[in-house]
Image (cartoon, rainbow, N blue to C red):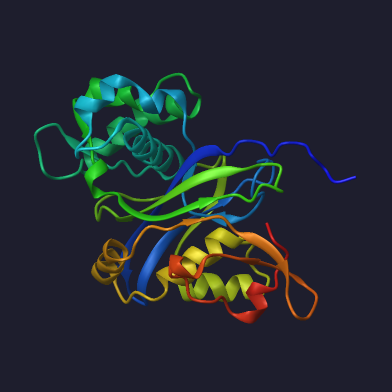
Amino acid sequence: MPDTTPAPAPKLAATILLVRDGASGLEVFMVQRHHQIDFATGAMVFPGGKIEAGDADPRLRARCAGALDADALAVRVGAIRETFEECGVLLARPRGGSALVGADRLRAIEARFRERLNADEIGLVDVALAEDLELACDLLVPYAHWVTPERVPKRFDTYFFLVAAPPDQIALHDGGESVDSVWTTAQQALAEAEAGRRTIIFPTLMNLNLLGLASDVADALARTRARPLVTVRPALRRAPDGKPELVIPPEAGYPPLPPALAKLPPA
């Protein structure tokens, strides 16, 4: 008999592609997830995670730049919070200012709040109020929207954002959820996955491959703003050689993966 068990509802999540112009071209920041984490164990990912109730705190409305509805606001707050928790980059500015917090002030904020945020003792709204900050939601450029297929036990409704990395903030893994981190070009990350040196799940592979079309940060931001945001719900099918492969809607604008990566087991 066919399985009629309803698919679990996907959990809302958000992630940020921090990008910078490096010596070898456009680079993106990635972290390696801890092997005891129950999703994407040991994989290289972009900083991010599940949206929490505190990300929708109504007090954040006055602390976020940009005209956004409640759901869009919560997703961006969650992306900013997760990025601060996971790699110490805080996309926020002093309220009324135009520049993001500098390295010296960031160190003080991190010492006071990062560990407590990671322990869920406080929310990002507490940091914003205590430090009189405005969250730089306006800097988050919508990059992609992926929803996990229904057949997968752990499902996520994930929004990806592209952000130019603050030049005077140092991104570094937290040593808890993530155990390693690297600035890498998309091409290098894909080559390491193809060689078996890195584990990268399908949505991350696809978004890296898309990012690899851009030559620098300005080009990446321009391409992202010009590309329509198409929700991607991958479907599983059998390739002509009998192996399983995931397919996505062509209108999402993704270039095809290298053949060796396209045939990796779906994840």
Decide if residue 103 is in sight here.
no
Name the quadrant containing residue 215: bottom left
Decide if residue 14 is in sight here.
yes
Question: Does residue 65 lie above or below 40 as drawn?
Answer: above
Q: Nearer the viewer, residue 140 or 251?
A: 251
Name the quadrant containing residue 21: bottom left
Coordinates of residue 26 in the picture (x, y in percent): 35, 71
Residue at 77 percent across and 36 percent down: it is 5
**The C terminus is located in which quarter?**
bottom right
**The N terminus is located in which quarter?**
top right
Coordinates of residue 206 in the picture (x, y in percent): 52, 66
84 to the left or right of 109: right
Question: Does residue 105 lie above or below 194 as drawn?
Answer: above
Coordinates of residue 3 in the picture (x, y in percent): 82, 43
209 to the left or right of 17: right
Residue at 65 percent across and 69 percent down: it is 197
Residue at 45 percent across and 65 percent down: it is 252
Coordinates of residue 239 in the picture (x, y in percent): 73, 75
